[in-house]
Amino acid sequence: MLSHLNKNNQPQMVDITAKSSSKRTAHAQSVIVLPTKICDLFCDGDLKTAKGSVTQIAIIAGIMATKKTSELIPLCHPISLENCDIEIEFIGDKLVVDCYVATSGKTGVEMEALTGATIAALTIYDMCKGLSHDIVIQSTRLMNKKGGKRDFKRENNEKH
């Protein structure tokens, strides 16, 4: 049975009242493929636009998104995040967004990490769309999580 369905197959928030608090961490990654005309404009891993620095604004948007995850995904618990770090690296024709999130609590933070990486990627798209609509958000995936019932680590942990 899926954890977000009750015995009558109706949606429910997972009951975490009996769980113990523990350290929870998650790392999610989004990959954005940029057309050559945009890649050529990047200097030292960033692109300055009339709206500002693409990577710095994407980092701020991603951090803000992690804090709003429970407002965006209906059955996520609102949690108090203790850390959020977003890194953006320019590799070839790709921008790789890594979002690391941590808390001490009764539920995991993988949805927060996935939301942060996704919104950072969408912000990059938004900031660059005036140059080209051939931008592709290639993937968003959980790379690892720790805490709770089981840990997870993606076997192929490459940056691309």
Image (spheres, rainbow, N blue to C red):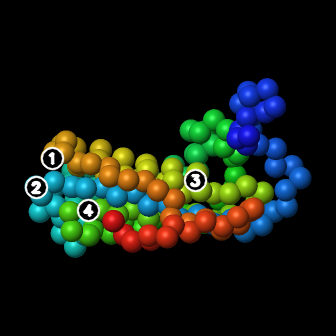
Nearer-N-terminus badge (1/4): 4
Taking the image as shown, residue 131 lies to the left or right of residue 141, namely left
Nearer-N-terminus badge (1/2): 2
| Labelled disc at residue 131 | 1
Q: Position of residue 32 (x, y in %)?
A: 30, 55
Please rate how many residues cluster around mark 2, counting C-alpha atoms within 10 Å: few if below 14, some from 14 to 19, many from 20: few
Question: In the rendered image, which quarter contains the C terminus?
Answer: bottom left
SS at mark 4 in the image: strand
Q: Closer to the camera: disc 4 or disc 3?
A: 4
| Residue pictured at 79% horizontal, 26% vertical | 8
Report which residue position mark 3 lands on.
112
Q: Closer to the camera: disc 1 or disc 4?
A: 4
SS at mark 2 in the image: helix
The kind of residue tagged 1 is Leu
Compared to residue 57, the image places residue 160 above or below, namely below
Report which residue position mark 4 lands on.
94
Nearer-N-terminus badge (3/1): 3
Query: Outermost residue toward the front?
Result: 1
Q: CA distance from mark 1 to mark 4?
A: 16 Å
SS at mark 1 in the image: loop
| Residue pictured at 73% horizontal, 55% vertical | 107
**Disc 1 and disc 2 in contact, CB within 8 angstroms:** yes
The kind of residue tagged 3 is Glu
Compared to residue 127, the image places residue 113 above or below, namely below
Q: CA distance from mark 3 to mark 2?
A: 32 Å
Taking the image as shown, residue 53 lies to the left or right of residue 100, namely left
